[in-house]
């Protein structure tokens, strides 16, 4: 079975398509909710989605508001803001509970 990549010019890292409906962390904004963007350990901007509300709460806390978005919709919202990467179910830094490997922008 071959794996399909989203970007033919740069297949690393491989991103299976589609990720499906995701639970996306948001913050309140003047016109409603805004998706939270994060920075990777190397400083790049990334949109973040979780495959369950439990995974979102484990990473960002149970008080973190979220919305449900399809993977293509999240990418479409994040790309104009400079976040061409989508991170699904980001890991926590080992040995430091509740400290994500990603930083909020």
Image (cartoon, rainbow, N blue to C red):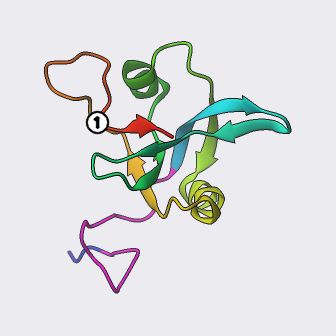
Which residue is painted at 56% across and 20% down in the image? 64
Above or below residue 86? Residue 79 is: below
Q: Position of residue 92 (x, y in %)?
A: 26, 29
Which residue is painted at 26% across and 73% down in the image? 3
Above or below residue 64? Residue 105 is: below
Q: Secondary structure at mark 1?
A: loop
Q: Position of residue 42 (x, y in %)?
A: 28, 52
Q: Tell whether 94 sits left or right of 38.
A: left
6 or 42, nearer to the observer: 42
Examine the residues drawn in magenta and state their main secondary structure: loop
Q: Position of residue 48 (x, y in %)?
A: 47, 44
Q: Is residue 3 magenta?
A: no
Number of numbered tags placed on the structure image: 1
Q: Is residue 11 magenta?
A: yes
Q: Quadrant of residue 82?
A: bottom right
The residue under label 1 is 101
Quadrant where the N terminus lies?
bottom left
State the extent of the magenta-drawn residues as a range.
Answer: 4-20
């Amino acid at each position: 079975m071959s794996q399909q990549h989203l970007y033919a010019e740069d297949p690393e890292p491989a991103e299976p398509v589609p990720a499906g409906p995701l639970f996306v962390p948001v913050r309140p904004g003047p016109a409603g909710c805004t998706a939270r963007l994060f920075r990777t350990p190397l400083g790049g901007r990334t949109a973040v989605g979780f495959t369950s509300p439990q995974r979102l709460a484990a990473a960002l806390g149970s008080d973190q508001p979220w919305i449900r978005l399809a993977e293509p919709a999240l990418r479409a919202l994040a790309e104009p803001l400079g976040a061409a990467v989508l991170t699904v179910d980001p890991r926590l830094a080992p040995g430091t509970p509740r400290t994500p490997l990603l930083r909020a922008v």
